[in-house]
Structure formats: structure tokens, C-alpha cells
Amino acid sequence: MNGLPDRMEEFLAGFFGNIKFVEKALLGLEGSYVELLTILSLGLLAVLPTIVPERRRQTWRRLNQIFGIVIFIYVVFTCLGVFGMVRNFFRGMNEIGRENIIALYYCSVPVTILVTSMLFGPAFCGWICPTGALQEFAGMLTRKWTLRRKLRGYPFGWGFLLTAGLVGVVFLLWVWRLAVTRTFFVEDSTIYWSEVLVLLLFILAFRMREWDLKLRRIRILSFWIIVLGALAGIRITSPVHLGFAKVYDPASLLSTVVVVVGALTIPNVWCRYLCPWRCAISWAARKSVRFIESDVSKCTKCGKCFEGCNVDAVKDGKINTEECHFCMKCVDACPTNVFTIKDDWRRK
Amino acid sequence: MPRSSARTVIPLFILAAHAALHAMLGIGGWLRPFELLSLLLLGANLVIALCLWKGSWDLPSGTCTMLLIAGHGLIGQRLAPDSLTSGAMLTVNILIVYVGVKIYEHLSRLHFAAFAGSYLILFYIFLTRMQNAEALFLLFLMGLAATARDFKLLTYFWAIVLSFTACQPYAWETTFSSFLILTALFSIRDSNWNPASVIFLVGGMALLLFVLLPVIVLMAGEDPRNVVAMLKSESVRDALRLTAVTATISTVILAAFCVPLAYALSRLDFKGKSLLLALADLPIIVPQSAAGLAILKVFGKQQYLGGIIFDAFGIRFDGSVFGICLAQIFVAMPFILKGSLAAFESVPVALEGAARTLGASSFSAFKRVALPLAMKGVVAAAILAWARAAGEFGAVLFVAPYPETAPIAVYNLFNSVGLVQTAPLVTTILLFSLAMFLALQILVKLAPGLTRREGSGA
Amino acid sequence: MTPHLHIGGVEASFGSFKVGPVRIETERGEYLALLGPTGCGKTSLLKCIAGLKIITAGSIRLAGQEISGLPPERRGVGLVAQTGDLFPHRNVRENLDFGLHYTRLNRTTRQARLEKHLVMFRIAPLAHRYPAGLSGGETKRVALARAMVLEPSLLLLDEPFGMLDHNGRLEMAELLRMILRELGTTVIHVTHDRHEAWSLARRCAIMNQGRIVQCGQVADVFRRPADVFTAQFLGCENVFEASFTEQTARCGEARFALGYKPPFRSGFVAIRPERIAVAAHGQPHLISGRLIELQDAGDNLKACFDCGALKLTARLPLELAPRLTLNACFNLTWLADAVHAIKPQGDEGANS
Amino acid sequence: MSRFPAATLIVIVLTGTLALALEPQWPCQRGDSSGQASVTFNNGSEINEWHYLHKGARRYKPGLAVWASPAIAVVAGRPMAFIGGYDQTMHALDLSDKRAVWTKLTNGEIQNAPVVGMASGLDVVFWGSADRTVYAFVAYSGRMLWTSELVPPSNSQGDVEMSSPFFMEGRLYIACFAFDKSLPRNSQRGVLYCLDAENGRILWRELVCDGPTSSPLGFKRDGKPHVSIAARRGLLQCYDVSGESPRRAWSFQMPHETLGSPVVADCDGRTLLFLGSKYGNLIALDAATGKEVWQKMAGNWFDNGACVGDVGGRKLVFAGSHDYNLYALDARDGALVWKKALGGEIHSAPCLLPFADRAAVAVAALDNHLYVLDAATGESRISYFTGNPIWDKLVKGETLWGSPSAIVAGRQTALVYGSFNNVVYTIPVEKECSLTASPRSSASLWKSLLFVAVLFCGLVVPLVVRFTPARSATTVSSPATTRANRS
């Protein structure tokens, strides 16, 4: 019984064991640990969406996402996944005025993300975020099936229920394995997020049509849990955390697997319902300079934009800015050019 | 696409200048010949030149960026010791230049002035006034870039900057409170406002802040671990439990008597009613210590009434839970009575009349019409009374100093070990009270049936 | 046959204001309009009947049973207040269900009756709305339904048309007629608007300063107001002091034929303004007067004529408008039954 | 050092100590060359539970321990522990009297354990501090014997890392790495120093590598003293130090970076060195040739040194890994004897101790617990909660952490462990202890999962669904209208 999971874990542990290119976050100011490369690379990644050519934009985007994964896994040190980012931001703010370099070290990732979101729109979600990219790549496998479900208005489907059940089984088996092999401790709380995701999948199996948008508000709850956790000094690892840190963390591995498997049934399921950063980013990007303007009068209701959107943020030429990931798929898909990307510095 | 001559000339010129600069520096021995960063800078300039030439970047920001890159080629490396720092600075500077050009082009001169001024002040604060703050400068510059185009955001940004530089020991607290004030100020701007009331508001808020700051500092400044450690202590938990239990019992007793009384007072009119209402406020007027003494004088075990009760039921009030409840009931009574009275008075009598004609007895009408409609006010009053009862110190101290309730525990601890060691306990109690209070408030908000009062016939 | 509702000598006091003694009798299924100006005690009287006010004297008998001593919940009287008085914390359905809760009906019967009334009063689509979200007409309908769902034998309506627009009134009137027709409930309808009363009631009672001044068939009351107040309240602007000789009323210099002999020598004479007509030149006329004021009152023209000592107000058909010029003299005429003699004031009980 | 045996004798007489069981008294980091940080002492005095609290004024850097490992010695008949930390102070603690006998403030953090050895006929504590200085203080009085600054100060100096000293035959070996900002990364200098223990004179210095190093480890082979030292980036080197200047005997490149220091043990007539690396390889080398004997893979880093001991007639190597497991391997061939998963990443070096007449191994893990496991079976015997860290900037696997040390007093064993919460705990393992942690089990996980599930389905989802503003409630599947409504 121990054979396969053991080997799997060992394989993954070997895979994720130590992956950073540099053993410190590169030396910068005064030979200290500084995430300067983060500012550099994230800044570059954020600027890329603004200058890529319109032709084959989605290919560029995928490249950007792959580059984002590489950057986050191999270079960035302070971002321990979405939760760690919130926590580190708080830490960094606390260091301002005392250990300024450490403040920069911890704040650079979240500040860069928020600042680029405020200026260039929520492009981080659609173009850079490694968690989102992972889910998107996984979701490509079941694209046809999920699209059919979406176009039929999320009917109750045995297939979906079955897949949700599969996720649940993966979850429970792994939890059982964690529970019997080792004692459980605080950082593993990411298990709860996976659990919530599994429960969500089950709930959504029956009520997706009615509750999809409503349940997205759980993100806010998730955000506040993490913020309060940061205030209380509780470490909670995120899914995909194991990819960013040097530490192989089975609980994080579990939640990553659940998130990825979940993304097979609902594209970007983590972003939709649980991602705490999404709140902050959509807040920051509300009045961003760069945004997608839609001219509904041109819309022929062909449904192409709705088909393409991974997070169901657009329908019939109207964009729900709170959900939009700025992937610009709708812009590229629209046959009548309903959408235009605008830079408006006067936007208030 | 027709290209203007500037599009062709300027990039080439700057590119040439950059190359010449590097050649000069290289020949003069100022720069290592094939230093990575300088090659990168040249490469970046080439890319931007191409972008400019192709027309996919607008002229002013492109030119400024190229100049900036050239400038970094010249002096950036002298300033920053390593290529990475230099590169990060360059990135942030490009962002600033880009934002600055855009603000200059698209927004008013006032915006640009605010942006440039902010940059200079940040420069002054972080690079001139503070030591070792280059990192912070980078951090805050990014913030400035994001917020500069909106005065409201810029104000918030400056609130953060000033809180974290000028008000350092209380940075979070100041941020929090200034955000509160700013949000309030910004949100009134739209409604019809006049200078007088805004000034009054600001003044009042300043005082409110003065009241709130100690509380906020106490709560934010304490290490959560100390609080947890406090919560783990048996005596503290006992005190908190006792406080919660006695306050709840007192509130229940008060509710059982005062809510019907308030209903009666709101519905009946009789001689001496106003006198009765005035007397009901007496516990507020009487100093707590005096109230405690008064209770002791009547209900003390040695006293007449207290003696009778003790003989008859074996209940003693001084130094027991009953005494605590008694003192709490005494002080909290006006709050629940007045609150419920106001709530019941807001319920139209006609509704009860309607209920009567529909077959409800007067008790039933109270239960099914008056009480549900007044419930929000009644519960708010009960919560207030609960808070008052839980926080009661003076009267309880006289009547029943033991078993310790939370306020008395604070007093005793302060007397024995002093300020520093008492602080975590106070924070604990504060958080506990706040949590209970919020929980009750949320409960009232969320409780079904109580939320649908919008537009009642009041 | 004993009257269904008998109110005999009811008196009640509200502070300094006194109501009564009041005496009203209605038959079963009768629709009685209780007319009176604002503040005359109509609503108070309703409250007395419903039991929300304690009466100090007199008796109220409903279907032969004395109810004045009973608490309101046991009187079986439905009351629809002016504002509707819906319970804001209950939705429409729960509002209707409120009274049923006390009826000891079983659940299915209750449900059935509730559904029936929801449909009957056309409020089924509103069943889950809260009163705060209802319009004025809807509120009234719900209030009416709430009272009627208990099937009271007596329904008291307090200004049911108050605060309604024209369409709302029509709808409401239709509903009330239906109640009258299908449920056979005795209704007392309190209003200050005589048109409202005319449209529904066959009997009406006029109330003034806490007393019933006249009670009778609508046409009767309208044609033959018992006193000056009633006449004026019912829209008769032309009331003049007069002395009577045989069948003639003398009013200053003018004389009017009455068509009957009043039982008193002096008193008042009332001329219905609607019955006054402008006679063509040369036609026989009763009086001539100079037009001093002309006002378009919507469905008629209100014209004031200065006829020497008298100032006559006439309600003329709109078609006359082109013929009427201010300060011109016109000949006025009316039929004999337009004139009604009114007993002098202070002569109590002469007509009752 | 001819005076060494004589001095030992004098001390024995002086202190009345009957059993100082270990022959070379303090030759290594905290313990003997087998890595056992245990000392036995027997003069009848009891060691009771003691929490020594010292709040340093320094702010802590991320990833560094508050306390280094303690060194325990019997000095003047009293069991004493010497421990330094990021408060820059060396504390000499009397474990039976429960008091700090003396403290010495230095100018830099003390990142590693001190060593107690004999010099000038006295028990002397040697330690290195981040002020680039080696201190030698008389153990029982705190009188300064000598100090020696290893690296001259310079303007461009950055962080300094001083290893634990190693005391062998009157000589003190210590490695020092001072980061020089003026130099490129690949021309930094990690240097091994050899000092005269009597007066602190530097006998020789040897450039070991271009980065930080582990603590040096001395052992004897063919009667000749050797010192082995590992560079952080994975180069393990062995020097013959019998002559005037060191001679490199061999070197071995580890598969990846190493954080711990090597330990040595005799095994079947061979002397083996054990060292773990960042990829999770624990490697046994022949100390004579520097050739790999066996290699064993764990799930993650070996963060600290290993520990070797005789358990039930077998020589076992114990090492804790970041995959939460404590591994017990057969020293001869690396066969896995047992492994035990604990509550967190294991960051400390294990330490052997007798516990109820059986060998036990104590190890601290990042879940803030100190575990005592049966050395033969890996069964968990007891665990202690050693407090939450006072700061939360745990950077796992980037530093050497403090490890527990054990002292055996008569039939009773005590663990000394400097925790991250400013406290040095002295824990008598067979007596009542206020820190004893309740055993944890998987049940708590299942319970809390159930709790979360009930909370989520029973409270969160109903509330979220019910109290969602109408704009999203009415436009469930059409965000378009959502936006239209808002605007």
C-alpha cells in the first residue's frame, strides 16, 4: 500500500526538492537578501502584455505564463504562494523604518503586483500567475467537455459529479495517508482549502447554474482568513507553495493536486472561488489605466467571447470587471471587434 | 505608415549618444569593456529604438526612457554597487518616467505638479533624511507611480508614507485611523456639504481618534502570542468566563423584566410616568462606587434585607456570583430600559390594534407584533446592557471583589505587577469584549426575521 | 327583523373630544357609508365598534349579541385602517395568515382559504413581498384581504380610497362591490368623500362633531339634508336663511317654490347647484343674476351669480362655457325638487 | 600537549567527579567525536526543570536561531551549560543551582556552540562570535583567558560566520567566513584557523573554500590528527594537521550544498565520516581515503549534522531531514533501520541519551517540539513543547539551528535546549515536566476536517448564498447584466 504513494511522493520530492537558481534572493543593496530580480522580472512580465503584438497574442500569453512559472519557481524567494504573499506583505510593512532592506525584500512581490494591476489592469492573473497558469494548462485537457457544460448553462451532469467525486477520493486518500504517516501541524492548514474546494465542487455539481457567482464571494472570506492569519503570525502554506519554496510539503502537494484536478472540471476553479489575492487584485485594478472597453452595440451575441473566457467574466460583449483576468481572449475571439483595449489616464 | 522625422532621428541620436558614452567610458577605464549590465542597457536601448521607429511606442515616453537608460549607463553604475541594484533602480525609474510622461500628456498640470512634488518629497524623506532607505525609496516610488493620477489615491498613499515615516512607533495605528478619516472625508464630498460641518467633523474625529488611539495601540501593539499565553492561563479564562456568564445572566434577568416594563411604559400614560423615567436613569448618575456601597448597605450579609435573604434562602450577595449579577443589573438597567422604550415607542399602536381585530389577544399582539418590530432596538439595548454589565468595575468591586471578573482581574494584576505585565491581559479582555460585542451585533444582523424591518410603519 | 348591527346610544370620550351618543342600525349585508368631515369622530366610532376603544355608554349588538363588553379579538369584526396597518415584519402571505393563526382551522383549510383570498384579491403575485415594497393600492388590497380572510360578519373600512389614485379607486370599488355581492358582509365604510359613498353605498349616515346628524337612503339624504351642515357637506353651496309660507320659501326678496309644506316657519333653504340651469333669453326664469366668477371644475363649470341679496353657485354643464361671459346677466332656473327646506339650527330631532 | 593528562587528573581531583566517562573530554561540537552531545556526571545533585529566560536586545535576522546549541560540562563539580545566541552573549548556566554563573557580552552574534576544553590546567570555554573573535574564558568563573581576532576589520565587511571551535590536543580549530562586499562572489574566503589553546596565537590559517564552511571535525587516523571540514557548497576536505602547516589529505565533492558538519565514527575497524546534503543524500565516507562507502537518499535536506552511536550492539547513524523524518541507518552499510515522521521539519542534530535504561535519541523539529525517540525502534517516547518562536521569519533550511544536548546525572537524564522563544530549557526527561506535550494523532486532523466541512456547508455557504447582494443573485449566469446594473 505504501509503494505507489511513497514512490510518487519521493518522485515529487525529488522534483521539487531544490530548484532555485540562486541560493539567496540574489545580492543587491549592500549585499543583503533583496528581491530586486523580482521587481525586474515581474515588471517585465507586467509590461509584456502591453507591448506584445496583437497577432498570436494568446501564444505570447502562454509563453508569458510559462516564463512566469519559471520566474516564480526559480527566482522569486519571498512569494510562498498566494497565502505567503499576503503574509509576507504584512511582515514587510512591519519592517519599514527598521530593516528597510528586509521590507523591500518582503514587499517587492506584492507591491509590484498591486502597482502593475493599478496601472496595467489585472494582467497578473491572466498573464503571469503561476497558479492560474497551472490550472489553465490543466484545464486545456478537458476544454471540450467543460465548454459543452458551460454552453448548456451548467446543467447537472453525472460526469461532473463523478469527477468531483474523483477529486474527493484523491483528497481523502491523500489525507488518510498524511494522517497515518505523520503528525499534523499548523502549516498544513492548506488541507482545509483543498477540503473546501472539494466541497465546493460537490455543491457546484448541483447548483452551478444558480450559485456560481454567489460562491465567488468566498474569495473574500478566504482573503480575510489569510490576512487575519498573517496578523496573528500563523503560517499557512498555499497550494503550489511547494513549487516556490525549497521545502517539500506534502500538504501543499495535496492541495496542488486537488486544485489541478479541480481545474479539470471547472476552469480556473481556484481563481474563481478561493484565491485570496484575486480580491486585492480586482480591487487594485478597478480603476486601472488599461482596461477593455466594450461597445455592446456592435455585439452580435455570437457567444464567442463567452466560450473563450475561463472565468465566465464576459457575456454578450459585457465584461464583469470583478472577475476579469485580462487574458484578452475575448478581444481576440470577437469577430466584430466589440472589445478594444484602452489606455485612459483620465479614468477615475 | 508615414513616419515623422522625429521618430527616426531621435532614437538614432540617442542610440548614438549612448554608444559614444559607453565607448568613452570604456576607453577612459571607467567601465569594464564588456560589463553585462552595460550591454543589457545598450540592448534595451536598441529595443526601444526599434519600438519607436516602428511606431509601437509613443515618442515622449520612449525618448525619456532611452535617455534614462543612457543616464544609467553613465551614472547608474557609479551609484549602485552592483548590476542587480542598478537594474532594479532602472526598472522603477522607467516606470516613473512612463507615468510622469503620461500624466503630463493626459492630465492636468496640477496632477503633474502633485506627481513631481511627491517624487521630490519622497526623495527628500528617504534619501536625504533617512539612513539606509534606498530600498524603501524604490518601494514607495512604485506606490507613487500607481497612485499619482488620482488625488484621492495619492492622499491615501501619503497617509501611508507619513504614517510609516513620521509616526513610526504607531505606524499601523496611524494608517488605520487616517484611512478612516480620509474615507469619511472623501465620501462626504459628494453629498451636499458645507465648510462648517466639515470642519466640525474633522475636529470631532480628531477627538474621537484621541479616545480610540489608546485602544487601538493597546490592541495592535501587543504580541498575539502574549495574548494567547494569557488566554491559556486558567485564572484569566476563569475571569473571562465569569464575566461572560454573569453579564449574560444579568442581561437575561434585565430583559425579562425591563422589556415588558418598557412596553408598558410606551403604551400607558399615567401620572408620575415622567418622574419614573427620570428615576430609572439614576444608576447612570450615581457614581459606581456609591452604587456599590448602596447595594452593599441593603443586600450585604450583615444588613437587614441581605440578612433576611441569607437566612431564608442561603443566598449571600457580598462576595458571590449573585452579588456580581446584582451590581451589574443595577448599573445596566437604564440602558436596556431606555433602549427598549425607544424601540417600542417607534412601533405604531395601530399595528397592535390591527392585530387585535384579527383575533390576537393583547399578549399575542405583544408577542407577534410589537416585540418582533421592536426587536432590533431591544436587542441593541440588550447588547449595550451586556457590554455595560461586563465592563462594570466600581460597583462589583464593592459588592463582590471575589470571584474576580475581568475588570477586577485587571485591577488586581495592575496593583500587584504593574503596567507592562498587565497590558497583555488588557488586550486579551479588550479583544474578548470586542469579539463578543461584534459577534452579538453580527448575530442581530444575521438573525432571520429581524432584517426585514426596512420601511416599517414607524 | 332585528338589525344585524345595532349601535344604540354609544358614547365614548377621547380626552376632551366626545363621541356620541350615536345610534346606527344596519341590516345584514348592507353597505353603509359613514360620511363626515375630518375630525368628526368617524374613525373613533369605528374603533369603538371594533373594540379598540372602550365605550362609556350605550350598546353595540352584532347579530343579536351584545359585543360592547367583549375584547376586540372576540368581536368578529374586521377593520381596515386608513393606512392599511400591515405588519412590516411579515410578508403578504404571512400577513394574511396572521389572523388565521387564531381561528383553530386545520392547516389545509387555512391554506385553502389563504390561497382563495390571495387570488380573489388579486395579490397572489405579491405573496412573498414585504409591505415596504408594496404600492398604495396593493397595500389596501392586502389589508382588505387580511381582514376578509377571517370572514367577519361586519367589516369596517376606514377611508379605503384614501391615498389612492383614480385607477386604484376604481379597482378598490370593484373589489368592495364584489365583497358585497359574493360574501354578503355588512360593511361600514367611513369616508369624507360623498362621491365615494354614492358609488358604493345605498344607505349613508352623516356624522358631525361626534354625532350622527342624519341617516338614511343615499338619495334621501342627498336630496333632503337634515341640516345646514349636511347640506353644505354634501356639496350644496346654496344655503340661505329663509322663511316659509305654505309651499314657498322667502329668501330676502327672492321666492322659491318648494313643492311641499315644511313643518317650520323659518329655517334655511338649500338649492342643489347641479339642478340650476341657465335659461335662454325670453324663457321663463326664476331669478336673474350677474356672473361674477367662473371656474372650470373638471366635469362641470362652477359659476357664481350675484342675484341681489343671494349669491347663487351653480354647477353648469361644460358645453355652456362659450356662452358664459363674466359680468353678464343670466337668467337662472331650476325645478321645484331642487329646493329643499331645512329646519332651523338648534331644533334637534325634528327630522329623526 | 604533555600537560593534558595531568591537567585532567587535577581537574578530576579538584571536582570530585567520579565519572567523566568520555575519554577525550570535549573534542567536538558539543560532544564526542561520535556526535553524542551527552555528558555523564555523578555527584548526587539533582537536575530539575529550569527555564532560563534571557531577552536579548537584538532584532533577529531571518533564518537564524535565537540560541545556538549548548555545550554541557561538569565544571568544578557542578553541571554547567554554555550557550550563546543572537543576544551576542555567552551564558554560563549552573544547571543544579538554576542560575547564570556568568555572562559575557561580545560584539557579534554567537551562531554556534562553544567547546569546553582544558587549557592551562583549567576548564576553558572557547567560542567564536560574529565579531570575528575567538574567546577563551575560564569555565567556572568567567575570567577571560584570551581573545583572538581572526580577521582584521575592513570597511567592506559584511556578515561573518564563525563555526563551532574544535578542541584537539591543545589546539583549537575554528573556521571563519567573513563576507567581503568588495570581492566578487567567487573570490570570498572561508578560512580554517588553528589556534594555540593556551594563548590564542594563530598557528596557521588555511583557505578552505570561497564560501561559508561547516564546523571543523577532528579525528585521529594512524595516530595522526586530522581535521575535516565541509564547505557550504559541498566540498568536504580533510587535512592532516600533524605538521606545522596542514596538508590536504583528500577532498570529496558532495552532490549538493551541505549545511551540517560531518561526524565521525569507528565502524568495523574503519573510520567513517557522515555528512548529509541539501538534496537529501546522507553519505558515509572512509575517513582514510575520502571514498564514498554508502549513500542514502531522504526526501529532503539534511539540515544539520548527524549523530552516531551504539544501539543494541549496532552502530547507528541518526539524521533528521526536512521531509519530517528522523532516519536511523546502519553505519556499516546505510541500511534503513527505522524512520519516524515527526511533526515538522527536523532542523536540529539528534543527540543520544539514556532514557529509562534504554538508548534514546532526542531531536527538535520545526513544529516547536522536542522529541525523544527510542533509539532502537524509533518509537516516540516523550515529547516536549518548547515554545513558539519569538519571531516568525523562519527560513527553513538556510541556517544551522540549535540542537539539544543531554546530561546524565546519576540515573537521571536532562536535556538542555535553547528554544527560539528566548528560553533555555533544562528538561529532566524522566521526571515531571511542565513542557510535556500531549501526544498528537491523526484524529485531530480528521476532527478539524469535519469541523471545517460542517462550518463551510452549514454556515459559510448558506450565508454567502443568502446574503449575496441582489445584483449577482438576479444575474446568475450573465455577468453582462451585472455590469449593466451597476453602471
Image: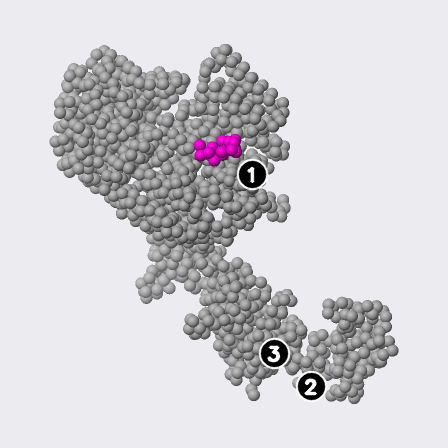
* Direction from residue C172 to residue C310 in the image, left or right: right
Q: Does dot 3 land on a helix, a strand or a loop?
A: strand
Q: Residue furthest right?
A: C282
Of labels 1 and 3, the one closer to you: 1
* Direction from residue D145 to residue C89 in the image, left or right: right
Q: Amino acid at mark 2?
A: Ala
Residue identifier under label 3 = C32
Residue identifier under label 2 = C350
Q: What chain is tagged by disc 1? A: A
Give whichever of B245, D239 is nearer the camera.
Answer: D239
As measured in the structure, the alpha-carbon distance from the residue carrying label 1 to the one carrying label 3 is: 71 Å
As measured in the structure, the alpha-carbon distance from the residue carrying label 2 to the one carrying label 1 is: 89 Å
Q: Vertical placement of A34 versus D439: above or below?
A: above
Q: Earlier in the sequence, mark 3 or mark 2?
A: 3
Magenta span: chief secondary structure: helix
Please report the bounds of the magenta region as a residue range: A47-63
Horizontal and vertical percent for residue A22?
A: 37, 26
Q: Are marks 3 and 2 on the same chain?
A: yes
Residue identifier under label 1 = A340
Q: Are marks 2 and 1 on the same chain?
A: no
Of labels 2 and 1, the one closer to you: 1
Residue shown at the point (19%, 37%) measured from the top left? D378
Of labels 3 and 2, the one closer to you: 3
* C289 within the magenta span: no
CB under 8 Å between discs 2 and 1:
no
Q: Vertical placement of B437 versus A343: above or below?
A: below
Residue A337 appears in which quarter of the rendering? top right
